[in-house]
Image: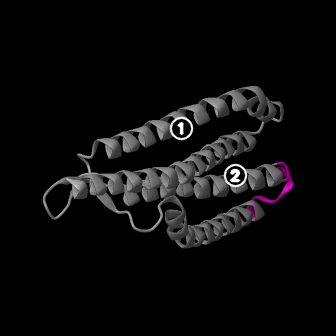
Amino acid sequence: MCGARDDSGRATFNISRIFRQSAKVTLTIEIVSAVVMLGAIVAYLIGGSLGAIDPDLQVLLLLVGIIVTLLVFLAAFGAFVRLSGRIGDVVVGPGLDSVPRDTPRVKAVMYTYGILVILMVVTGIYSWYLVDKAILTPWAASLSSISLRIFGLALGAFVISLLIQIVIAVVGRTATRVVIEVLDMDDDSEFRE
């Protein structure tokens, strides 16, 4: 990913790939967590009424539920394939692929980007931990529902990945502009010399 080399043999950062992969990972987490949330809510809603249903019908309902879940997952995967290219274009504008890794200001931008994303992940997880501890866990425990507990965890994964994706989009665009400006300044200074 970062270990590419240009035609002259210099090590390069593949900036567009770094930003696009970050955005795709968060989108994947969002899709999977949305499917899990949907399944958990459906399980909670029909869970109480399953005890009164004949066991043969329970098996049939389980099979239909699995089919519906797989159809939702396939639809979500189709949306992912269509959206991943668009998200990549939003995160990284056209015209920037690889830049020399030995450019000091580019290194600073890339390391700052990495630190910001890591801090956003940690902050998001800790914030969700506080929400989960204070609100969602007591709510699921009061209803004695494992489904609602799973829903709360999936909702946390969804919210955290959405926040990270927003940060990646904003920072990715900004970092791309800064890197382009740095490279333009370096080209101008080489031209003047």
From what the image shows, is residue 143 above or below residue 189?
Answer: above
State yes or no: residue 188 in magenta: no
What is the x, y in percent for residue 31? 60, 58
Closer to the chain start, of discs 2 and 1, is 2
Residue ID at (64%, 71%): 71
Q: Position of residue 109 (x, y in %)?
A: 40, 43
Q: Residues within 10 Å of mark 2 (few under 14, many from 20)?
A: many
Residue 55 highlighted magenta (yes or no): yes
Residue pointed to by mark 1: 121
Q: Residue at x 74, y 64 (%)?
A: 61
Q: Which residue is tagged 2?
A: 37
Where's residue 43, x and y in %?
75, 52
Label 2 close to label 1 by CB (< 8 Å): no
How far is the residue under mark 2 from the one under mark 1?
A: 21 Å
Q: Quadrant of the N terminus?
A: bottom left
Q: As drawn, is 51 to the left or to the right of 155?
A: right
Location of residue 140 in the rendering, given as x and y in whole percent from the top left corner = 77, 35
Residue 156 picture quarter = top right
The segment highlighted magenta reads: 48-56
Amino acid type at circle 2 is Met
